[in-house]
Image (cartoon, rainbow, N blue to C red):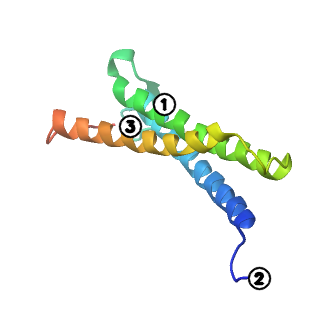
Amino acid sequence: MPDGLSTDNATMVGLFVEAVFYGVYLVTFFQTLVCLLHYPADTGSGQLDEWKIRLPRGIRLITLIVTLALFVNCSLNLFFGLVRMLQTYIFLLKEKPSYWINLARPFNVTSQTLIADIFLLANSIIHPGRQFDI
């Protein structure tokens, strides 16, 4: 037996690490939503104890839409990996697992990178030198 992990074990470890990083992503996603949908209320005492909900005109709608699109895309990618794992190792469909999942996962990764890069480039080209306060 060669040194290192077998393909089966490496796939399981990869899905586990992806799930751990997804948990970290969930924490940052909900913090992002709090920053996009709320703003700190100044109580006059110098402390920011309360948070007020932003009015719809104060919400940066494009940023919110991109954030939600990236969240859905990341969730689908993890879901497709889990379905592929279940088909291969639990239901023992090693001879012909779903072919569409093999195509959907790279498409998700590529589209997530594309959405994020277009958003960053559009903000830097449309609003050069402008600082956005959250």
Other-residue count near label 2 (Cα within 10 Å), few / some / many at <14 / 14–19 / ≥20: few
Label 3 residue SS: helix
Label drawn at residue 106:
none
Distance of label 1 from label 3 (alpha carbons): 11 Å
Image: 122 above or below 54: below
* Outermost residue, left side: 129
Task: Classify residue 18 by image quadrant.
Answer: bottom right
In this picture, residue 99 sits left or right of residue 30 = right
Nearer the observer, 44 or 128: 128
Label drawn at residue 1:
2
Amino acid beneath label 2: Met
Give me the residue at 44% from left, 27% from top: 37
Give me the residue at 71% from left, 82% from top: 2
Nearest-to-viewer mark from 1 and 3: 3
Would residue 29 be visible to someone looking at this image? yes
Tell me which numbered mark, 3 or 2, is placed earlier along the sequence: 2
Other-residue count near label 3 (Cα within 10 Å), few / some / many at <14 / 14–19 / ≥20: some
Which residue is under mark 3? 115
Nearer the observer, 39 or 8: 8
Would residue 59 be visible to someone looking at this image? no
Amino acid beneath label 3: Ile
Which residue is under mark 1? 68
